[in-house]
């Protein structure tokens, strides 16, 4: 069997990393490959949005540094919502410095990301030291990391040999790296999770370089595992309804892929 025909439950059973096993398990149980990108700037709005859409998502992605009113209570409430609705918390911090610096950025400063985020991500540009630094803080807490192999924005430089070398770096650090940010499947290892931002119900773009693909293109044709949706949900009239629509579209695309 190749990756494409394995079910979430089968892939969960193959994972040695606890967090990837848990995430595949949630995707199976909730019938959701949808991640909400909760990019709002007030914590009240953030918590309301996450509570409303929580039943439909396997993961919530944050940019905690865009909150105007960040405080410790926000992350405590976010983790309670993650337990209530059973989803994984991913802070999209995109670490991109030497190991020693990212250790501090991950554990310290204002946000203490390692205390509450299950999942973080990093650019591969600094070399494996960035992973080793993050791992020193996160591994013992059961955290994990994604590498950014590709980006959704037009003209980005993460392509070709850079993307391939990023995949190699992940393979060499499988104890802490559980997958990728990418716009199509970059590895055939079924224990890696592929997560794709730049998703809307209709293809298109914004006016700052973001490029959108549809759920069926991302999950069905490009073989990604999780679609990450921001404005398509939180700018909708009814975010819970929009989340439900994305959940169904994403899960249908997964089922169609399995049936091929
Ligand atoms: F790594 C990436 C990337 O390549 N593209 C992205 O869009 C991350 N993102 C994030 O996904 C971005 O920072 C937003 O938080 C989110 C997409 O939001 P949208 O509103 O659905 O465009």
Image (spheres, helix red, strand yellow):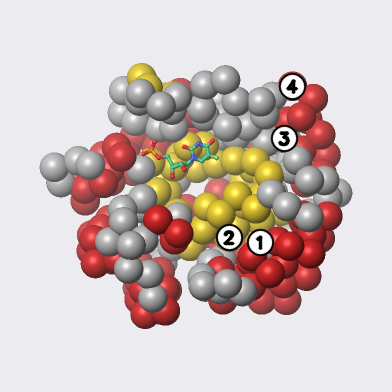
Residues under labels 2 and 1: Cα distance? 5 Å
Picture coordinates of residue 15, whole percent (x, y): 70, 57
SS category of the residue bearing label 1: strand
Residues under labels 3 and 1: Cα distance? 18 Å
Residue found at x 69% / y 49%: 96
Seen in the picture, residue 156 relative to 73 is either above or below; the reply is above
Q: What residue is pinned by disc 2?
A: 119
From the image, state whether disc 3 or disc 1 is nearer to you: 1
Q: Tag on residue 160?
A: 4
Sequence order check, earlier mark of 4 and 2 = 2
Q: Nearer the viewer, residue 150 or 154?
A: 154
Q: Tag on residue 197?
A: none
The quarter of the image holding the N terminus is top right
Sequence order check, earlier mark of 1 and 4 = 1
SS category of the residue bearing label 2: strand
Q: What residue is pinned by disc 3?
A: 187
């Amino acid at each position: 069997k190749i990756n494409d025909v394995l079910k979430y439950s089968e892939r969960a059973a193959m994972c040695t990393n606890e967090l990837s096993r848990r995430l595949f398990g949630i995707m199976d149980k909730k019938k959701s490959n949808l991640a909400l990108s909760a990019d709002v700037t007030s914590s009240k709005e953030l918590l309301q949005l996450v509570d409303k859409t929580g039943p439909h998502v396997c993961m919530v992605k944050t940019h905690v540094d865009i909150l105007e009113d960040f405080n410790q209570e926000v992350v405590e409430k976010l983790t309670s919502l993650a337990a209530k609705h059973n989803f994984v918390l991913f802070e999209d911090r995109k670490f991109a410095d030497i190991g020693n610096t990212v250790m501090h950025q991950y554990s310290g400063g204002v946000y203490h990301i390692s205390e509450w985020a299950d999942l973080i991500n990093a650019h591969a540009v600094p070399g494996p030291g960035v992973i080793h630094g993050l791992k020193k803080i996160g591994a013992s807490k059961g955290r994990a990391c994604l590498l950014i192999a590709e980006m959704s924005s037009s003209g980005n430089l993460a392509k070709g040999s850079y993307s391939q070398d990023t995949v190699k770096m992940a393979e060499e650090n499988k104890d802490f790296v559980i997958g990728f940010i990418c716009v199509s499947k970059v590895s055939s290892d079924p224990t890696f999770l592929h997560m794709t931002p730049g998703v809307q119900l209709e293809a298109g773009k914004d006016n700052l370089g973001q490029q959108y693909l549809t759920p069926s293109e991302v999950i069905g044709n490009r073989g990604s595992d999780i679609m990450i949706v921001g404005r398509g949900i939180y700018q909708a009239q009814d975010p819970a309804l929009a989340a439900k629509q994305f959940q169904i579209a994403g899960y249908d695309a997964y089922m169609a892929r399995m049936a091929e």
